[in-house]
Amino acid sequence: MTYRTIGEVAAAVGVSPQTLRVWESQGLLVPDRSDGGQRRYTDEHLARALQIADLRRRRGWNPAAIRTSLAQESGAESGRRHWDNHSIRNARRASGLSMKELAEMVGVSPAHLGAVERGDTGVSTQLIMRIADALLVPPSALATFRARGTMVVRQDERACGLFAGGVVWEELTLPGYRLESSLLTVPPGEASDGAYARPGESFAFVLAGRLRFTLPDEEIVLAEGDSIILTSHTSFAWDNPGQEPARVLWVEQLEAGAWEHARATKIVRSAQPDDAPP
């Protein structure tokens, strides 16, 4: 597991190390400690720090209100599946592939894929897209949903994926539709970890911060309020070149029949908890 220092987390969130110490004293963010007592922050700690900063900036909440919100979020977290471990393993097994077979299909070693499935290392956006494509399913087929209806997804029902570097994907729509809508949060300096392409058109609208797209022939930097549409099968990579987290609304068009493949149905069913709606 990769750890970050207090200075690295402070820089990624856009606050001072002293602010992180204050949050720790308030019980909002408690890092791990080394044998020597040094603070050690995981990707989960970074994601929580980004949440705290966002709640302070957007809503002006005090520590008590933030603690309540985070506690509710932790309760909802039991219904979410991070895409960096169990969901990938379950999807691979549901598809009938061995670890070696899937690793060869996505271009990584079996050892690396095994580490991802165990949660020993984070998974990049690029790799999760390659895994979804190899399994012949939309990316959201690898997530767990607890929405109670067929159309509406409440804030505490979103499927959430935590990726390497603290990058967070939150699914805003349910499986089974031609459009997949997500909320992407990218800490400063983090990226997709390489280029990838999608079978359908992709649309991104920057809600806050900046996001840079690297295309085969150019680079495009989007600021708050800017948007971009990427045609199908266009190779692109993205990263956050700014000093604050980027929050991006992301909409992807799926191919016709994407959810009709028998493997997709089997994988979605394998990912659902026992008490999920049919």
Image: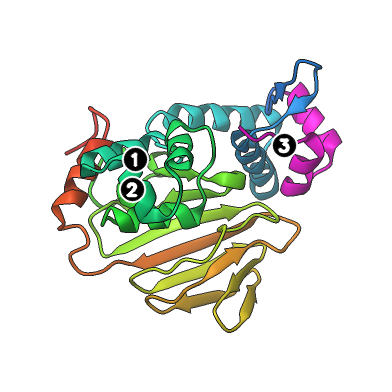
Q: Is residue 186 left or right of residue 152?
A: right
Q: Nearer the viewer, residue 112 or 261?
A: 112
Marked residue nearer the N-terminal end (3 or 2): 3
Q: Quadrant of residue 267?
A: top left
Rendered view: 141 above or below 271:
below
Image quadrant for the N terminus?
Answer: top right
Q: Residue 9 magenta-drawn?
A: yes
- Mark 3 lies on residue: 4
Q: Are marks 2 and 1 in contact (CB under 8 Å)?
A: yes
Residue 99: which disc? 1
Secondary element at tag 3? loop
Q: Quadrant of residue 60?
A: top right
Question: Which stretch is magenta?
Answer: 1-26
Q: Residue 197 magenta-drawn?
A: no
Marked residue nearer the N-terminal end (3 or 1): 3
Q: Main secondary structure of the magenta part?
A: helix
C-alpha distance separating marks 3 and 1? 29 Å
Q: Amino acid at mark 2?
A: Leu
Q: Amino acid at mark 1?
A: Met
Residue 29: x and y, percent?
A: 68, 28
Rendered view: 260 above or below 272:
below
Q: Are marks 3 and 1 in contact (CB under 8 Å)?
A: no
